[in-house]
Image (cartoon, rainbow, N blue to C red):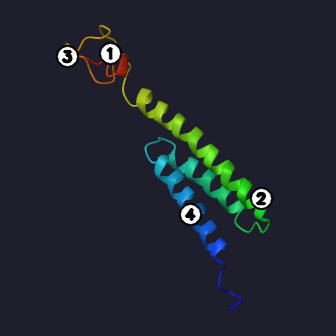
Amino acid sequence: MDNVPSLKDFLHRQTVLGLYRKFLTLVKPLADQREVQAQIRLEFKAMKNEADDWNKKRAVKEGERRLKDLQTTVSTSVTFGSSPFTTGTHGTNSGAEASEVGSGWPWERK
């Protein structure tokens, strides 16, 4: 019975695994995907055997913060890095691409 984790430990493990999966899914579209994945693995392995509950909670909060930062960075990178920046007339839909600056903004919808 000593090898059975407590409910608290089980829930923490599920939280950490979910966070890890989100990180790995998020970096898939990046050009340097393997390097970023390796860095993510190192960060998670560094905290793998942490026993202190406060440090575990702090690490999860820090991971969530970093995930949010990475989501912002990746979305910006994918949006601006995958296709050339297009210019066109502002606010018109005369054959302009969906990635054009100003198209689809909520304050311009009619």
* Local SS, label 4: helix
Which comes sooner in the sequence, label 3 or label 1? 3
x, y (%) of residue 8?
Answer: 66, 71
Residue drawn at the location 50% of the way across and 37% of the way down? 74
Looking at the rendered structure, the kind of residue marked 4 is: Leu
Residue 101 image-quadrant placement: top left
x, y (%) of residue 39?
Answer: 63, 51
Label 1 crowding class (10 Å Cα cut-off): few <14, some 14-19, many 20+?
few
Q: Nearer the viewer, residue 110 or 20?
A: 110
Residue 5 image-quadrant placement: bottom right
Residue denoted by label 1 = 108
Residue denoted by label 4 = 17
Residue denoted by label 2 = 55
Instruction: Name the mark nearer the viewer: 2 or 3.
Output: 2
* Numbered circle sitting on residue 95: 3
Figure check: 17 above or below 73? below
Verify CB contact (< 8 Å) between mark 4 and mark 2.
no
Which comes sooner in the sequence, label 2 or label 3? 2
Q: Is residue 105 visible?
A: no
Which comes sooner in the sequence, label 2 or label 1? 2
Looking at the rendered structure, the kind of residue marked 2 is: Asn
Looking at the rendered structure, the kind of residue marked 1 is: Glu
Which comes sooner in the sequence, label 4 or label 2? 4
